[in-house]
Each structure stands twice: as C-alpha cells, then as structure tokens.
C-alpha cells in the first residue's frame, strides 16, 4: 500500500463520516433506512433475474435521486455553507449570548410574555427561518423582549438563533403530532415539533403561567428556573467550543 492509497482511504473515510453526520442529525435518517431496503430489494431482483422488477426499480431510482435533492435541499445547502466556512461542527451560542438570552427569558416569564426561541446546532434551520422575517442582529435581551412583546408583528412566531446572532423572527415551526400531548398549547407543541425533526434546543415561555421549559430531541423538560436554564445553555456553549 502506497502513501497515495492511504490518503485516498482517509479522504473517502472523511467524506463518508460527514455524510453520516449530515444524515444522522437531520430528518433524512429514516428515509435513508428506507432507501437501504429499496436498494436491497433491487439487488435481489437483479440477482434473481426478475427483469421486469429490476427494470422498474432501476428507473424509479433515477427519478428518486432528483426527488431527494429537491426534498432535502435545505439540509444540503446548510451543509455546503458550513463546509465553505470550514465549520462542520455544531453552531453554538457564546457566553455573552447566553447571558442576554437568559436575562430576556427571565424578564419575559415575569411579564407573562409568551416566547418561542430555537438555538440552531448541527441541523440547519434555514427552511424554517425563511418562513419568518430576517433579523441578523446580535443576541440581546432588549431585542428578544421587543420581538415577543404582544402587539408587535413577530411576537406570535418562533425566533431562530445561530451562534451569537438572531437570524430570523416570526418563523413557523412544525407542530408535534403526538396524541398524548394534545393538551399543550401551540407554542409548546411547536417547540416539541421542531426538536423532533432537528437537534435544536428550543426554549418556550408560557404566556398563561410564565413558566420556562426546554424542548430537546423530542422531550419537553419540566419547568426550569433561570439559573437551571443558564446551566443547560452553558453546557451547549462548552460543547460548541
């Protein structure tokens, strides 16, 4: 084995690793599992010389490639953007951003202002950001409180943070369809829904009770104090540095 072979293997391994991360941390995972089953059936049909079935599956696969590119365009675009920036690890919020975010959430909870804030990590949230209004400003308590003040145009939607910046506000998040959580309000179901299809951390403040909860990977936390929220966000900050 020459040094070129070693470099070739390393290059292929690196590409496969990042493709796996792209798939495993987005909504594509279940689809890829189905794709593997599809390819297995196609292979068996070819080996067993089921010509009609093999022909049908082969032609469908060609169209399927274009369909996948269209369906997962946001994920692919986000991956390529991070690749171009030389940043393939997760986005993180810095220490000052954590301080401003927690201060805003604490004040909004005290004032009973409903809020829905998603912190983007590895899974790109671009497809949800485009449903709202572009903000592109540094995270600050004053800005977040203004966004969620009742009567402002963006207060009913979700806000997306990417790193230390507010990317967009007034965004539409997918609602969780879990039957056992129908009693939850729209904000809480939206927080859960987004956390089910991404690895984002989603903070939700109840307008009725003034409580603070966090949705992560399809799980909604118990009520948190501001200090508990700060602790969780600081963990995220440490993981991303």
Image (cartoon, rainbow, N blue to C red):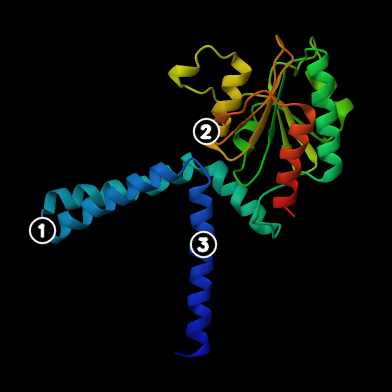
Classify the position of the C terminus by image quarter.
bottom right
> In the image, residue 144 lies at what x, y percent?
82, 26
Closer to the chain start, of discs 3 and 1, is 3
Residue designated by label 3 = 17
Q: Secondary structure at mark 2?
A: helix
Q: Position of residue 68 (x, y in %)?
A: 43, 44
Q: Above or below — where is 40 with respect to 216?
A: below
Evaluate if marks 2 and 1 touch, with contact meaning CB atoms under 8 Å apart. no
Q: CA distance from mark 2 to mark 1?
A: 40 Å
Q: Position of residue 56 (x, y in %)?
A: 20, 47
Q: Residues within 10 Å of mark 2 (few under 14, many from 20)?
A: many
Q: At x 53% / y 51%, what residue is drawn?
A: 22
Tell me if 192 is positioned left or right of 171 in this view: left
Tell me if mark 3 has few (under 14), some (14-19) or many (20+) residues whose alpha carbon lies within 10 angstroms of its own. few
**Splitting the image into 4 quarters, where does residue 169 fall?**
top right
Is residue 31 visible to the viewer in this orientation of the structure? yes
Q: Secondary structure at mark 1?
A: loop
Task: Please identify, in this view, whether the residue under mark 3 or under mark 1 is nearer the observer.
Answer: 3
Locate residue 33, reporting x and y percent.
36, 47
Please name whichever residue, 184 or 34, is drawn nearer the observer in this view of the structure.
184
Q: In which image quadrant can residue 40 be found?
A: bottom left
């Amino acid at each position: 084995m020459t040094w070129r072979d070693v470099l070739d293997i390393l290059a292929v391994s690196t590409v496969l690793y990042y493709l796996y991360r792209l798939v495993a941390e987005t909504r594509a995972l279940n689809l890829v599992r189905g794709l593997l089953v599809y390819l297995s059936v196609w292979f068996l049909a070819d080996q067993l010389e089921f010509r009609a079935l093999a022909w049908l599956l082969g032609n469908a696969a060609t169209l399927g490639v274009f369909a996948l590119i269209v369906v997962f365009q946001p994920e692919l675009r986000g991956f390529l953007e991070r690749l171009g920036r030389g940043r393939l690890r997760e986005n993180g919020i810095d220490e000052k951003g954590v301080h401003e975010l927690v201060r805003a959430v604490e004040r909004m909870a005290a004032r009973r202002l409903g809020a829905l804030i998603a912190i983007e990590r590895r899974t790109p949230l671009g497809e949800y950001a485009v449903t709202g209004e572009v903000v592109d400003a540094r995270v600050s308590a004053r800005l977040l409180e203004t966004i969620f003040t009742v009567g402002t145009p963006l207060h009913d939607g979700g806000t997306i943070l990417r790193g230390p910046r507010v990317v967009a506000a007034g965004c539409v998040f997918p609602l969780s369809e879990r039957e056992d959580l129908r009693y939850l309000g729209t904000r809480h179901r939206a927080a859960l829904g987004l956390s089910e299809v991404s690895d984002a951390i989603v903070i939700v403040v109840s307008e009725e009770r003034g409580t603070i909860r966090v949705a992560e990977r399809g799980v909604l936390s118990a009520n948190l104090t501001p200090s508990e929220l700060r602790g969780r966000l600081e963990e995220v900050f440490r993981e991303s540095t």
